[in-house]
Amino acid sequence: MYKIKTYNKISKIGLAAFDDKYTIGDEVENADGAIVRSAALHDEQFPETLKAIARAGAGTNNIPIDRCSEQGIVVFNTPGANANAVKELVIAGMLISSRRVVPAIEWAKTLKGQGDEVGKLVEKGKSAFAGPELKGKNLGVIGLGAIGVLVANAANHLGMNVYGYDPYLSVNSAWNLTHNAVHIYDINEIFKKCDYITVHVPLVDSTKNMINKDTIALMKDGVRILNFARAGLVNSADIIAALESGKVASYVTDFPTDDILDVDGVIAIPHLGASTPESEDNCAAMAAKELIDYIENGNITNSVNLPEICMPRSSDKRICVIHKNIPNMLTSITGIVAKNDVNIENMLNKSRGEYAYTMLDVSGIDPDDIVEKISAVDGIIRVRII
């Protein structure tokens, strides 16, 4: 039996992936795995039994990644599970920023009580809210991950000219991206060419404030900027100044901050990108499958702190070792295995930064003896046999 601790209300559809080998709940103690959404775990003391934490979502800033790595706890996220939900809201953001839908709706409410005059007043006042169509306009997509690709493809279907920028474009994203999108290799070309710019990159030191007064100066007059990734990607003071000068026609963001909430031209959405029942189900189901495959098979998919590594089972016993990425580790591990008359049927090793992971399918094993001896090697973090 395995135990899974839940830190938030997790979708029942997602939890249905666990069979009767698992006990699941928020009161579970000495858990083998955990699923979390937004609960902060930085002050949580993890039991020695905990092997993995799966975040039902993309961001993992609520999880102490470094401490988990040191304790040999694999941290998963669920990239792409909420991509369609975010994509739909981005498209909605482009439409409402162009057609001035939000102020138009608010203005229409002021006509209440005018009776038969409402129709005439609507026709008289609607010109104040006119705006351009999306068809034929240039859209720049910065970041061609799961969400960026879907946005690019949807915009292409709407008749937009799509320009994409991503210096780390994956093979999978490249396969899924519409062939009509133009791959841009200099981000400044996005700024110069596009009528709409949408940002879909993680917030790291190199991307913080990537939309600022200097990059805005390169843009077309009347550009519309969309940020459904993270607030820190756009410099608030610079975007406010650009809106006031008319350089930027509209700024749509799913990450409101206090300084932009009352600024004309800002459409602030209260982080609704992944707030759909389908998204929550998809994230929970993906998180559950990641935990099951790691707990039962040792395979790692979509980890944020350890390498991606999957190996088909070729024997009844599998040794899984999390260790520091330092010289002679493989020699030490395989040497101990050989000295104990254990035959290695198959082996795979991968590293990520200062950590590495090794899987060995073996036959003829004394589990307790092997685990104890490998664990004694300097640099070994965690050993288990499945």
Image: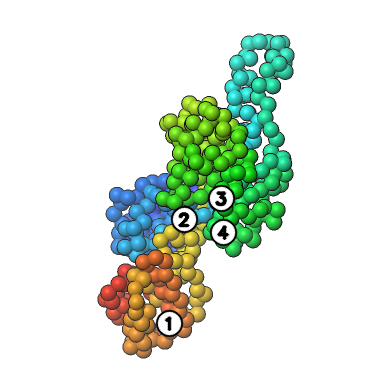
Q: Check disc 1 and give the amino acid type.
A: Val
At 64% across and 61% down in the image, what residue appears? 175
Query: On the image, numbered disc 1 is attached to which residue?
Result: 362
Q: Are marks 1 and 3 in contact (CB under 8 Å)?
A: no
Label 3: state its secondary structure: helix
* Residue 226 x/y as whole percent: 56, 40
Judged by depth in the image, the label closer to the viewer, 1 or 4, is: 4
Separation of residues labelled 2 and 1 (CA atoms) = 30 Å
Task: Tell me which numbered mark, 1 or 4, is placed earlier along the sequence.
Answer: 4
Separation of residues labelled 1 and 4 (CA atoms) = 37 Å
Q: Are marks 2 and 1 in contact (CB under 8 Å)?
A: no
Judged by depth in the image, the label closer to the viewer, 1 or 3, is: 3
* Residue 196 x/y as whole percent: 61, 40
Task: Tell me which numbered mark, 1 or 3, is placed earlier along the sequence.
Answer: 3
> Quarter of the image containing the C terminus?
bottom left
Label 1: state its secondary structure: strand
Query: On the image, numbered disc 2 is attached to which residue?
Result: 77
Separation of residues labelled 1 and 3 (CA atoms) = 49 Å
Q: Check disc 3 and give the amino acid type.
A: Ile
Is any atom of residue 214 visible in this view?
yes
Q: Nearer the viewer, residue 226 or 38?
A: 226
Query: On the image, numbered disc 4 is attached to which residue?
Result: 169
Label 2: state its secondary structure: loop
Query: On the image, numbered disc 3 is attached to which residue?
Result: 187
Separation of residues labelled 4 and 2 (CA atoms) = 19 Å
Task: Tell me which numbered mark, 4 or 3, is placed earlier along the sequence.
Answer: 4
Q: How busy is the neighbourhood of tag 1: few (under 14 within 10 Å), some, or many (20 plus)?
A: many
Judged by depth in the image, the label closer to the viewer, 4 or 2, is: 4
